[in-house]
């Protein structure tokens, strides 16, 4: 059991590094698999019975005038209640996104300092978020990290007050293999379903 424990009446805010987590899921299932990551179910499972006050998704979008194949995913996530923050800072030459990690780190810290949540759930295996996690903890907040085992190192696993190994949680579902977004990552957001799983080394928060 973790030294710093959470409460069932905690206000939870989720911060999702969308490219990191979708690419990790695709590595696990295979590029042509009809099984994909169910982002809605993942968010509900991680929050459990606690109050989820907001779930932020961080991504990049193509510069004005360029074909942005990820817009459909952003629209679906917004429809489901996620708050999508997409930075118009995609490098077309290097084929990599810019500003996204900084934007997510800033939101984590700012909301903590404004006392908008008790617990932050960071969905990413990227250790670049460790300084932001430490600042959130210094503000008196609890931080939980969730990631797939194939995309997270020991430092990131130990950075939070709890770690959720997504591999052992019911967060994958059947999806349309033809529905793809940029970077060849399957768009697999599904409607609400019931499910729960105990995170590694932590007490399970059951869905209600």
Image: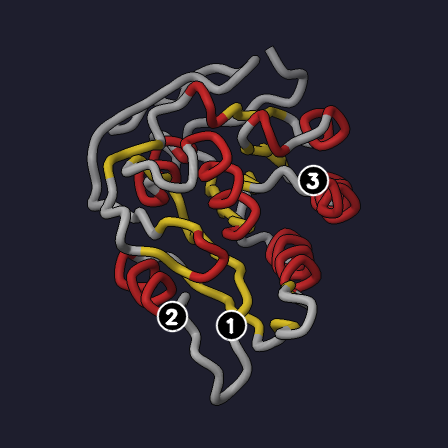
- Would you call the spot at circle 1 few (<14 residues within 10 Å), some (14-19), or many (20 or more)? many
Q: Nearer the viewer, residue 117 or 197?
A: 197
* Location of residue 51 (image quadrant): top left
Camera-side residue of 10 and 88 = 88
Q: Which residue is mark 2?
A: 71
Q: Which mark is residue 116?
A: none
Q: Position of residue 64 (x, y in %)?
A: 51, 87
The residue tagged with tag 1: helix, strand or loop?
loop
Q: Nearer the viewer, residue 129 or 142?
A: 129
Count the labels in the image. 3
Q: Residue at x 67, y 57 (%)?
A: 101
Residue 140, disc: 3
Q: Quadrant of the N terminus?
A: top right
Residue at which label 1 appears? 61
Identity of the residue drawn at 43% across and 19% down: 168
- In 3D space, how far apart are the residues under numbered discs 1 and 3 (Cα atoms)? 33 Å
In front: 32, or 108?
32
């Amino acid at each position: 059991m973790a030294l710093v424990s959470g409460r069932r009446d905690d206000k939870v805010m989720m911060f999702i590094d969308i490219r990191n987590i979708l690419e990790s899921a695709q590595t696990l299932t295979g590029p042509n698999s009809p099984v994909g990551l169910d982002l809605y179910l993942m968010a509900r499972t991680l929050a459990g019975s606690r109050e989820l006050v907001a779930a932020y998704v961080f991504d990049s979008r193509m510069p004005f005038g360029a074909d942005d194949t990820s817009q459909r995913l952003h629209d679906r996530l917004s429809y489901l209640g996620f708050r999508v923050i997409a930075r118009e800072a995609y490098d077309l030459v290097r084929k990599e996104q810019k500003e996204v990690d900084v934007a997510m780190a800033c939101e984590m810290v700012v909301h903590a300092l404004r006392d908008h949540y008790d617990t932050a759930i960071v969905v990413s295996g990227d250790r670049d978020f460790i300084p932001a996690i430490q600042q959130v903890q210094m503000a008196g907040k609890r931080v939980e990290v969730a990631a797939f085992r194939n995309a997270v190192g020991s430092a990131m696993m130990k950075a939070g007050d709890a770690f959720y190994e997504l591999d052992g949680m019911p967060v994958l579902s059947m999806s349309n293999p033809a529905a793809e977004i940029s970077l060849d990552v399957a768009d697999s957001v599904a409607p609400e379903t019931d499910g729960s799983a105990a995170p590694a080394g932590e007490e399970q928060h059951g869905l209600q």
